[in-house]
Amino acid sequence: MIRPSSKVIIKFLLVMQKHGYIGEFKYVDDHKVGKIVVEWR
């Protein structure tokens, strides 16, 4: 889990996913700063 989330972190995770370093990830809105749950490979 990554906190806080930002657009930069999401773009970084998309690049990591494209190159096969991570699996799926999803954004969890907790009505504060948000969290990102990542499936590591």
Image (cartoon, rainbow, N blue to C red):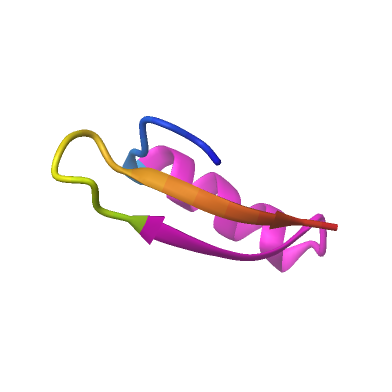
Name which residue lies at 17% across and 35% down.
32
* Residue 6, percent from left and from top: 33, 39
What x and y, as percent, mark residue 2? 51, 36
Image quarter in which the N terminus is found = top right
**Residue visible at 69% across and 62% down?**
17
Return the residue nearer the eye: 12 or 23: 23
Residue located farthest toward the front when viewing the structure as drawn: 30
Image quadrant assignment for residue 31: top left
Looking at the image, residue 14 lies above or below residue 7: below
Q: Is residue 31 left or right of residue 24?
A: left
In the rendering, at what x and y percent does residue 11 appear?
47, 51
Question: What is the quadrant of the C terminus in the image?
Answer: bottom right
Query: Residue 36: horizontal and vertical position, in percent?
Result: 46, 48
In the rendered view, does 33 fall on the left or right side of 10?
A: left
User: In percent of the image, x 36 and y 38: which residue is there?
Assistant: 5
For the image, the number of numbered tags is 0
Query: Is residue 15 shown in magenta?
Result: yes
Q: Is residue 10 above or below residue 17?
A: above
Q: Is residue 7 left or right of residue 19?
A: left
**25 in magenta:** yes
On the rendered structure, is 28 left or right of 13? left
Residue range (magenta): 8-27
The residue shown at (70%, 67%) is 18
